[in-house]
Structures are given as structure tokens and as C-alpha cells.
């Protein structure tokens, strides 16, 4: 049976004891993203409708996520609801993933694992949990221009949630697979010395989010 994975984590609902809690992507949304501001400004100057552009790219990215994750689960993906352009872009992304994966040995332990943290009272969906080259690794999968600091903050939050739930995570990495020639392939691990720093940033994000919520901003 074909599998259709939902990769829109920003709209995934998480609950602890029946009470809805925010997700990691919602929490990190309080971070400033200067690269996104520059991009939006450039697109506007070029006369591009950013809403339509983002929707199209989101479809490509979602399908690319689905293809990678379904393959790791040895399942198929239903592409019937996607455009030919989205399918082509996702296929390009898969080619990049295959080229990278052939250089590594891995045993998949979990894909799209939805978890919650009682400590932080947040939820998160962890992309790929596997033994990668002999190391228990959490890999956050991205499709876009590259890897940005907020991506590492998100990935570190997912790793800490997994650890809180009793799972072994010895390495945390971000894998960015391009959809077209305007984007670049990249893989980066979070350095062990940087893990507590990104965790600290995330905890400050929680404090800012909760303060804004008390003021009625959400």
C-alpha cells in the first residue's frame, strides 16, 4: 500500500495529559531569521509572488520528505495529488539523497517519530532516527537553500526530547537535500560542545514564547 507521510510539522498537534502544547517549530518561530528577510525583499524586488512561490516550494519539499522517509521504511509514496513540477523536484532531491546514502552504512530505528517533553511541555516530530555509520544519530531532514542556525536549534530540541523519552542519541545532524540547481546539498553535525548552547537557546525561546502568550500575542 502506498504511504503518504505528512511533513507539515508546524501544524501537527501535540498533547500532554489531554492539554495541547506547542511544537518545536512553533517555539523556534520566535527567532529572528535575517536570511528569510533578505530573501523576501529580493523576491519582492524581482516581482515574484512569494505566497505562490512558497506554496509551490512547500509541496516540493513535502514530497521530497515523504519520498526519503517512505524509502527508509521500505514503503511507496502516493504522488497522485502532486504536480509534475513537484514530482520532478522531489525526484532531484532523492537523487542527492541516494548519492549521499551510498557512502554510509545505516540501520533505521524510526521515522517521523512524534514525541512530547514533560520538562519543556512541547512536542516534536523527529525525522530520522538511525544507527548511522555505527552511531545512534538523529537526523533532521531539510529541503532548501542550505542549513541555518535555527535548524540546529530545532534539531537539538528534538534530540533532547528523544533523550527525555529514553532514546539514545549520540549525534545530531541536519541533512539538506536540494530540489533544484539553485539549492545546495549539505550535511552538518552539531558539535558536542555546541549542544548545550543550542539547548540553551531553545529554552530561551520557550521563555519568550510563554511570555508572549501571557500577553495574548498567541
Image: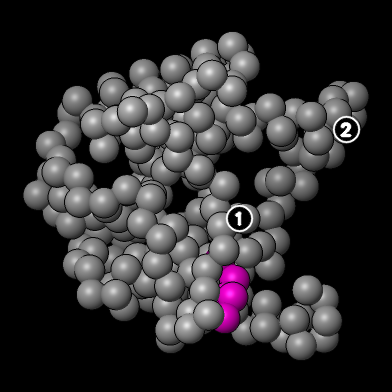
Residue stretch rendered in magenta on the structure: 19-23
Callout 1 secondary element: helix
Taking the image as shown, residue 172 lies to the left or right of residue 116, namely: left
The residue lying at 89 percent from left, 29 percent from top is 45
Q: Is residue 200 visible?
A: no
- The quadrant where residue 23 appears: bottom right
Count of marks, rendered view: 2
- Which residue is identified by label 2? 44
- Residue 41's place in the image compared with 198, above or below, is above
Residue located 79% across and 29% down the image: 52
- Mark 2 closeness class: few <14, some 14–19, many ≥20 residues within 10 Å: few
Q: Quadrant of the C terminus?
A: bottom right
Mark 1 and mark 2: Cα distance apart in space:
25 Å
Give x and y (percent) for residue 148. Answer: 54, 49
The residue identified by callout 1 is: 10
Q: Could you tell me residue 33's position as x and y percent?
A: 68, 55
Amino acid at each position: 500500500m502506498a504511504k503518504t507521510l505528512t511533513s507539515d510539522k508546524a501544524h501537527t498537534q501535540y498533547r500532554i495529559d489531554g492539554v495541547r502544547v506547542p511544537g518545536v517549530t512553533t517555539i523556534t518561530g520566535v527567532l529572528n531569521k535575517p536570511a528569510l528577510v533578505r530573501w523576501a525583499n529580493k523576491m519582492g524586488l524581482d516581482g515574484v509572488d512569494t505566497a505562490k512561490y512558497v506554496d509551490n516550494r512547500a509541496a516540493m519539499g513535502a514530497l521530497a520528505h515523504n519520498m526519503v522517509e517512505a524509502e527508509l521504511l521500505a514503503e511507496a509514496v502516493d504522488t497522485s495529488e502532486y504536480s509534475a513540477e513537484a514530482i520532478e523536484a522531489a525526484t532531484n532531491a532523492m537523487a542527492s539523497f541516494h548519492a549521499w546514502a551510498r557512502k554510509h552504512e545505516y540501520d533505521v530505528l524510526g521515522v517521523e517519530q512524534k514525541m512530547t517533553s514533560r520538562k519543556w511541555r512541547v512536542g516534536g516530530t523527529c525525522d530520522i532516527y538511525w544507527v548511522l555509520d555505527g552511531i545512534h544519530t538523529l537526523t533532521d531532514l531539510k529541503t532548501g537553500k542550505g542549513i541555518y542556525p535555527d535548524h540546529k536549534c530545532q534539531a537539538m530540541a528534538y534530540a533532547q526530547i528523544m533523550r527525555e523519552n529514553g532514546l539514545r542519541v549520540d549525534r545530531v545532524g541536519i541533512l539538506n537535500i536540494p530540489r533544484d540547481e539553485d539549492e545546495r546539498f549539505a550535511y552538518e553535525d552539531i558539535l558536542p560542545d555546541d549542544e548545550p548552547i543550542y539547548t540553551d537557546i531553545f529554552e530561551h525561546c520557550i521563555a519568550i514564547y510563554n511570555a508572549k502568550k501571557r500577553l495574548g500575542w498567541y
